[in-house]
Image (cartoon, rainbow, N blue to C red):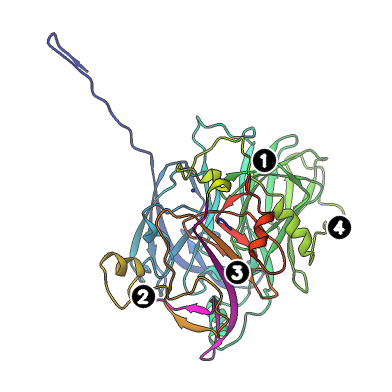
Amino acid sequence: MRVFLCLSIAAILFTIVIAEDPYRFFNWNVTYGDIYPLGVRQQGILINGQFPGPDIHSVTNDNLIINVFNSLDVPFLLSWNGVQNRRNSFEDGVYGTTCPIPPGKNFTYILQVKDQIGSFYYFPSLGFHKAAGGFGGIRILSRPRIPVPFPDPAGDYTVLIGDWYKKNHTDLQKTLDNGHKLPPPDGILINGRGSGATINVEQGKTYRLRISNVGLENSLNFRIQGHKMKLVEVEGTHTLQTTFSSLDVHVGQSYSVLITADQPARDYYVVASSRFTNPVLTTTGFLRYSNSGGSVQGPIPGGPTIQIDWSLNQARAVRTNLSASGPRPNPQGSYHYGMINTSRTIRLQNSAGQVNGKQRYAVNSVSYIPADTPLKLADYFKIGGVFSVGSIPDQPSGSGIYLTTSVMGADYRSFIEIVFENTENIVQSWHLNGNSFFVVGMDGGTWSPASRNNYNLRDAVFRCTTQV
């Protein structure tokens, strides 16, 4: 996949003032706190006392200054899922490129949402903290002068869905350390609630829902009883406005849809259910009309369960709206990606197994272990012995899993084709942190050069997370 005035008699002096892009400041305190998402008390991770954490609202090119104070008793990191890193990959919040925030200390993230719009989210990336909370929505609005390909909605909602465990996140990590895979989740959450999350609407008006799967492992299907969803944006790309009755959202993905409150005034089910699992986990919330004439009626609307072809066909239907205005993240011409010759093909194949009694996951047989020195520091200060470029092959090796600090080299400004291969019986999500790519092909079976004959080289969606 391809995978951006002072006036005097003698002289006139003109002073030109160049305005800087706006700054938005956030101060966050990360703490433990009691939460009850599935009806039992758990130790959650809160941001400013909130679970889920506060939304980040911004506009294209805004500078975000986010000061995070870690009040936990362990190191903590936040990653910004979908925010592009341009010459600041050390801010991406992933262990190995960003130093963890020590307990009792703070770190200020400096991000610019340069040439971006869209729906994204943030999450903690260390120590299974994501299984305890610490996540929240990110929205980047277009500048007022840039037309959006649909009328302004009457409301704009963040909808965070994801699988959830009743066990503490530390117990889940011990499960892996003891050589076992994670058990099935205990439930599904919508905006941090196992049931009863509510979206309020007024009859006759249209609303935007920004749906993100912030869970650990399960693909989810999202639907609203009696209402259609018009897909308008995927991770920063305006899409062809296709209407769906339900939408598959895989781990790490974000979608924007429009819904119109055009049904009789009452409550309707909002549903999120697991895909490709047995049993199917389901949770419900409510779409509530302001002039509601009664409670929800009828059965919970069913959705797809194990149909892989259904999901593949829906994914192929997600395409870029080429007539829409918007920021251009790569003015060098990558939006004509179909006419660009790629210089290299990288095949990445996932695998799982035990190494030294612990459950490990690998790419091309390499299971990553972090170095004591962050890789960006080692690279900048030319510190030897921390990592080796080429320590992970760019083709599947077929060997057993081994441990190393894997780093793959690439040429600056080159265009590459990345093929993700999933040999397991579960759906995998692949995310390029701080970058996006064009999803040009997706199918079952084994990839070969002949697969290129079926690539979408015209209007493939440009996104940061894809399912395989």
- Span of residues in magenta: 341-370
Badge 2 element: loop
Alpha-carbon neighbours of circle 3 within 10 Å: few (<14), some, or many (≥20)? some
> Residue 286: in sight, yes or no?
yes
Q: Which of the two marks, 4 or 3, is nearer to us in this view?
A: 3
The residue at 74%/54% (across/down) is 314
Question: What residue is disc 1 on?
Answer: 207
Percent x, y for residue 460? 63, 49
Alpha-carbon neighbours of circle 1 within 10 Å: few (<14), some, or many (≥20)? many
Badge 3 element: loop
Question: What residue is disc 4 on?
Answer: 299
Front residue of 369/56: it is 369
> Magenta segment: does it hold 334?
no
Q: Which of the two marks, 2 or 3, is nearer to us in this view?
A: 2
| Mark seen at residue 216 | 3
> Magenta segment: does it hold 362?
yes
| Mark seen at residue 387 | 2
In the image, residue 215 above or below residue 333: below
Contact (Cβ within 8 Å) of mark 4 with mark 3: no
Q: Residue furthest right?
A: 298
Judge left or right: residue 66 versus residue 232. left
Percent x, y for residue 199? 68, 48
